[in-house]
Image (cartoon, helix red, strand yellow):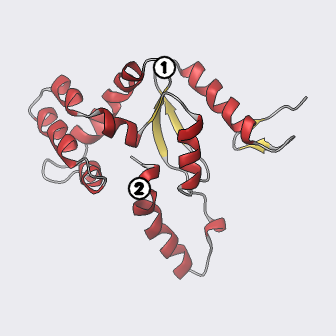
Amino acid sequence: MFSPEHGGLLTAPLLRGIERAGRTHSDVTVAPLVAGAIDNDLNRARDTIRPVLTLYFGGMGAPGKNFYVDLADRYGHGASARACRDAYLAGDKRGAACALTDELCDLVALVATLGERLAEYDAAGVDVLVVAPFGDRAALVAALAQHNCATAQPGEESRRFRCETS
């Protein structure tokens, strides 16, 4: 549930720890996992990733302690995450999914247009973005490859994609 807008909440403790160990950021790779969906219809893209987000916010942890709900609260979206958890634990998985606001989905997942959003992950100190593709997986992987190659230096292998130059 990494959000580039709140990246420091998760990366700051890591960076302090590696500094105390006498190391630097270049000694580690920051590689968060995010759910991703690409679609011309933003609502359809969000609905594609809602089931996995519902599982995390609704079904992970103990009824009184869910790290992901706590994190959403720190991101300013605790009410949505708690409503999802409460509905999920009551057996209403559809209601749980509906409780997730578009804003929370957009915050913790890679939804629809990629270029600007990927730049936000870069700015948040992400070295390698691990995307779990949902929906049209081939289109998402192709868009990620195209973005990575568009931002690579000529002849450079950008992240995990070999970029051909003409």
The residue nearer to you, when weighing 25 against 107, is 107
The residue tagged 1 is 39
Badge 1 marks a residue whose secondary structure is loop
Q: What residue type is labelled 2?
A: His
Badge 2 marks a residue whose secondary structure is helix
State how many labels appear: 2
Q: In this view, does 125 lie above or below 133?
A: below
The residue tagged 2 is 6
Q: Residue furthest left?
A: 90
Residue at the image position 24 percent from the left and 49 percent from the top: 69
Q: Tag 1: Cα neighbours inside 10 Å, few (<14), some, or many (≥20)?
A: some
Give the percent coordinates (x, y) of residue 118: 57, 41
Which quarter of the figure has residue 46? top left
User: Position of 99 compared to 164: left or right?
Assistant: left
Mark nearer the N terminus (2 vs 1): 2
Give the percent coordinates (x, y) of residue 126: 56, 53
Give the percent coordinates (x, y) of residue 73: 24, 53
User: Position of 152 compared to 19: left or right?
Assistant: right
Q: What is the CA distance from the residue labelled 2 to the residue labelled 1?
A: 25 Å
